[in-house]
Amino acid sequence: MSIYKRGRKIKRKILGAGALLLALPVYGVSNGLFQLAVCRDNSHSMLRREWLKKLWNDINGRVTERKRNRKEKWGKGSNVLEKGWSFADFTKELEAGKAWFEGQEKERITMTSYDGLKLVAYFLPAEEESNKILILMHGYRNKGMVWDFANLVKFYHEMGYHLLVPYQRAHGESEGNYICFGVKERYDLVQWTEYMAGRFGEECHIFLSGISMGCTTVLMAAGLKLPKQVKGLIADCGFTSPWDIFAHVLKKDFHLPKFPFLYVADYICRAKAGFHFQEYSVTESMKWNRIPVLFIHGEQDDFVPAQMSRVNYDACGAEKEIFIVGRAAHGTCNLVEPEAYRQKVIGFMEKYSGEKS
């Protein structure tokens, strides 16, 4: 072999080794992102390790300091938004609502999902005879199935609604190893809706309400065949697709680009969890939806930007309304503006059920 050919062979080996050295950390970080976001038990994710958490905190601290300095320099004329009211600002109200719900006598219902998981929901019947049903879908890794709705459950119950509150797959008492961000949960919600329609018959009125990932589950389910008894959807701070929300969080919290990390994490998710981040979207579902939707979002939401609800609203081909709460952060519209929120929601349900509460 000539010196020239031996040189080319050595060069290819060096390049290959270099590519492998680059690929290994990319795969490691991407797999950590998958474990952190998708796996039910994410305690083993490398992104939960103390040294890496400290690194992210240091990076985020520097970014926050730059924002603070920019705000001090330019004052109110800058584009830095004030922080909205978050769940941490309403702990007392949330704990009280959760305690009320837990103190009620409820029925535990189980069913088997299309892919063999045992799913669990709790049913709180109305105090008097009623044909009004509200299915409440909680958000991502929330503190108990009712936490997101803790300020609303007693109110809805007093308005004469039967309440069904499922644990989404891979949450609480429901089985599942992977959180699928609405892609598989939409089929579970269809089954819960069919169950309630069968239980209460042709004349019942069913509304589906979701907050955060629960909202996305509701809106994705609207692209499937739902029972005719479903009269409306209450969509509070949902995202447009798993891909979009991951890209947003990856940039905001980890300061990493989509390529290559999100692409590799998507490949890992497809291989391990059986779905991928671009498999389905709310915007696609809304093109097929014919059920009225009330879109709700906090303007100060920096976890799921309010623009995502505006995009979903624009894509919706059914009758629709949108309610934006200026001072609310993620999922807190019903806490920041409780009276306006309740009036908007009850007005919407009365309008499309054809009944007065």
Image (tube, rainbow, N blue to C red):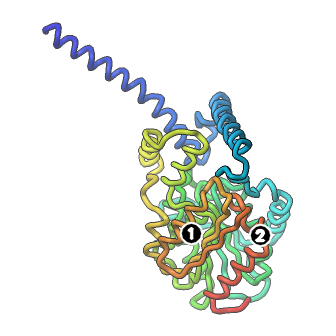
Q: Quadrant of residue 287?
A: bottom left
Q: Position of residue 192 (x, y in %)?
A: 58, 72
- Residue corresponding to mark 2: 337
Q: Is residue 27 left or right of residue 206?
A: left
Name the residue at 37% across, 22% down: 18
| Residue at disc 1, secondary structure | helix
Q: Position of residue 214 (x, y in %)?
A: 61, 63
Name the residue at 57% across, 81% down: 230
Name the residue at 16% across, 13% down: 5
Between the residue at mark 2 and the residue at mark 1, the CA separation in whole angstroms equals 23 Å
Closer to the camera in the image, 326 or 203: 326
* 18 to 295, vertically: above or below: above
Do we see residue 275 in this rendering? no
Q: Of the residues under marks 2 and 1, which one precedes in the sequence? A: 1
* 256 to 121, vertically: above or below: above
Q: Amino acid at mark 1?
A: Val
| Residue at disc 2, secondary structure | loop
Q: Residue 218, which numbered label? A: 1
